[in-house]
């Protein structure tokens, strides 16, 4: 029953994110469609947050065939993966960044920062998987982590787009250069459902 529900949730999630990516890549023109509609904004919020919340609960309960719970380790993996990407891409982007990734949505993000962040996150992925044996060290985990990171970028950009539309830069100033705690969750809102999707594709969980 749970697997059927999660499949439906992931179908809704993937359909929404295809549309969301289109909104991001065409911003600010796309804001003419939804910018003045509280109904559409509420719908976008529900389509973003509901699958994320459900996927968090699903991920935490994943078990091995011997009923050993490994969901918490998987949760830790995807959180650290995304945060290491965010931090390293910010640092390297600040030092070496020249080419803007999405200037209309998030002017501080650079292509150089993203590429360096991808390298750092892949190194972390290898170390984590070699240390904590929740995944076999196969090419799938590196492909999976790459997909998750790319989707997490769009999660961050989606949040930036919404904040730019309503005139908010960050949700706080706890982390210098990164904003508040909620700004660190932006990427995870997209990354965790993406992680479960690739787990089902590659590992048949």
Image (spheres, helix red, strand yellow):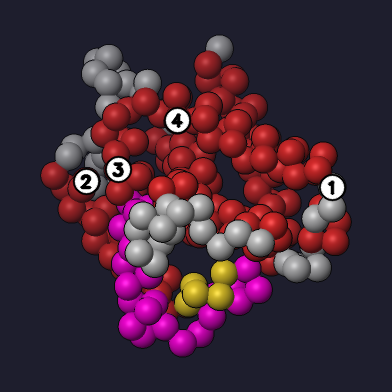
Q: CA distance from mark 2 to mark 3?
A: 9 Å
Task: Looking at the image, tell me whether mark 2 or mark 3 is earlier in sequence order.
Answer: 3
- Residue identifier under label 3: 77
Q: Within 10 Å of the Cα at label 1, are there few (<14), some (14-19), or many (20+) other Cα atoms?
A: few
Q: Of residues 192 and 139, which is closer to you in this image?
A: 192
Q: Within 10 Å of the Cα at label 2, are there few (<14), some (14-19), or many (20+) other Cα atoms?
A: some
Q: CA distance from mark 2 to mark 1?
A: 45 Å
Left or right, 54 with respect to 93, comes to: right
Task: Looking at the image, tell me whether mark 4 or mark 1 is earlier in sequence order.
Answer: 1
Q: For the point 41% across and 58% down, which residue is it?
A: 173
Whether residue 13 is visible, yes or no, is: yes
Task: Looking at the image, tell me whether mark 1 or mark 3 is earlier in sequence order.
Answer: 1
User: Looking at the picture, does residue 64 appear above or below residue 93?
Assistant: above
Q: Quadrant of residue 136?
A: top left
User: In the displayed image of the protein, which residue is found farthest to the left?
Assistant: 131
Position of residue 75 measured from the top left corner of the image (x, y, whole percent): 34, 36
Q: CA distance from mark 4 to mark 1?
A: 29 Å
Between circles 4 and 1, the one closer to the viewer is: 1
- Residue identifier under label 1: 37
Q: Within 10 Å of the Cα at label 4, are there few (<14), some (14-19), or many (20+) other Cα atoms?
A: some
Q: Quadrant of residue 94?
A: bottom left
Position of residue 171 measured from the top left corner of the image (x, y, whole percent): 51, 53
Task: Looking at the image, tell me whether mark 2 or mark 4 is earlier in sequence order.
Answer: 4
Principal secondary structure, stretch drawn in magenta? helix
Q: Which residues are magenta?
A: 81-105
Between circles 2 and 3, the one closer to the viewer is: 3
- Residue identifier under label 2: 129
User: In the displayed image of the protein, which residue is found farthest to the front?
Assistant: 173
- Residue identifier under label 4: 56
User: Looking at the picture, does residue 28 appear above or below residue 166?
Assistant: below
């Amino acid at each position: 029953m749970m697997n059927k529900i999660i499949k439906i949730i992931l179908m809704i999630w993937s359909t929404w994110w295809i549309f969301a990516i289109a909104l991001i890549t065409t911003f600010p023109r796309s804001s003419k469609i939804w910018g003045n509609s509280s109904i559409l904004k509420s719908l976008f919020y529900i389509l973003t947050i509901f699958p994320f919340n459900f996927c968090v609960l699903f991920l935490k309960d994943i078990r091995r065939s011997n009923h050993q719970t490994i969901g918490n380790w998987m949760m830790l993996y995807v959180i650290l993966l995304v945060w290491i990407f965010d931090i390293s891409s910010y640092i390297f982007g600040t030092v070496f960044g020249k080419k803007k990734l999405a200037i209309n949505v998030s002017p501080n993000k650079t292509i150089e920062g993203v590429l360096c962040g991808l390298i750092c996150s892949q190194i972390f992925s290898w170390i984590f998987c070699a240390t904590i044996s929740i995944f076999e060290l196969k090419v799938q985990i590196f492909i999976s982590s790459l997909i998750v990171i790319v989707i997490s970028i769009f999660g961050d950009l989606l949040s930036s787009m919404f904040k730019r539309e309503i005139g908010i830069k960050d949700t706080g100033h706890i982390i210098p250069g990164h904003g508040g705690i909620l700004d660190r969750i932006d990427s995870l809102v997209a990354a965790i459902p993406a992680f479960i999707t690739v787990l089902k594709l590659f590992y048949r969980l």
